[in-house]
């Protein structure tokens, strides 16, 4: 259904922005309920993270054209992470892995290579 709709519009050379596509996808059977349940659970099961501290290395890849979330979230993340690397991708939206897959892959590859492997001690 959606693919036929999008193909018709693309054939007519109508520009469709990503917000419109997101709305169409949410109309698909069952997806609206799933999206609403996600946010219900998010609000229902809140925890007090004011004293949380993440000591593991963290990589944040941020699309500078992200509409749903503002850059202030990066500052909030820095409060909780003692070892954080932030890479801002200028020409990317919220969907950076689709907008700039090569850039995302390169940053992840660099991050994974420079982050030392964890030493495991298994006590079973």
Image (tube, rainbow, N blue to C red):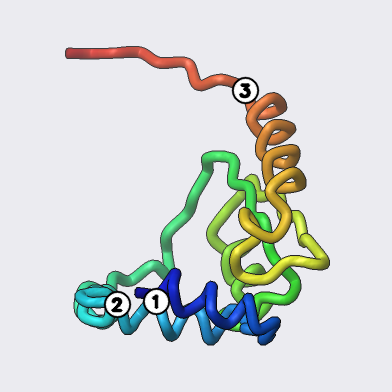
Question: x%, y% of residue 106?
Answer: 74, 38
Q: Earlier in the sequence, mark 3 or mark 1?
A: 1
Which sits in the foreground, 83 or 42?
42
Question: x%, y% of residue 16?
Answer: 62, 83
* Residue topped by disc 1: 25
Q: Give the structural element (helix, strand or loop) at label 3.
A: loop
Mark 3 Cα shell of 10 Å, populated few (<14), some (14-19), many (≥20): few
In which image quadrant can residue 91 be found?
Answer: bottom right
Rendered position, 54 above or below 67 = above
Question: x%, y% of residue 25?
Answer: 39, 76
How many angstroms separate mark 3 from mark 2 (CA)?
Answer: 43 Å
* Residue topped by disc 3: 116
Which sits in the foreground, 38 or 43?
38
Mark identifier at residue 69: none
- Residue 23 appearing in the image: yes
- Residue 88 falls left or right of residue 24: right
Mark identifier at residue 28: 2
């Amino acid at each position: 259904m959606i693919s036929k709709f999008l193909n018709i519009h693309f054939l007519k050379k109508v520009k469709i922005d990503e917000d419109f596509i997101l709305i169409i996808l949410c109309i698909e059977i069952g997806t609206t309920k799933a999206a609403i349940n996600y946010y219900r659970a998010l609000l229902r099961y809140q925890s007090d993270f004011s004293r949380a501290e993440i000591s593991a290395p963290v990589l944040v890849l941020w699309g500078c054209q992200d509409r749903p979330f503002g850059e202030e979230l990066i500052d909030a993340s820095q409060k909780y992470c003692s070892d954080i690397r932030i890479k801002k991708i200028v020409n990317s939206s919220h969907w950076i892995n689709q907008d700039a897959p090569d850039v995302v892959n390169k940053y992840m590859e660099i991050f994974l290579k420079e982050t030392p492997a964890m030493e495991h001690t298994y006590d079973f």
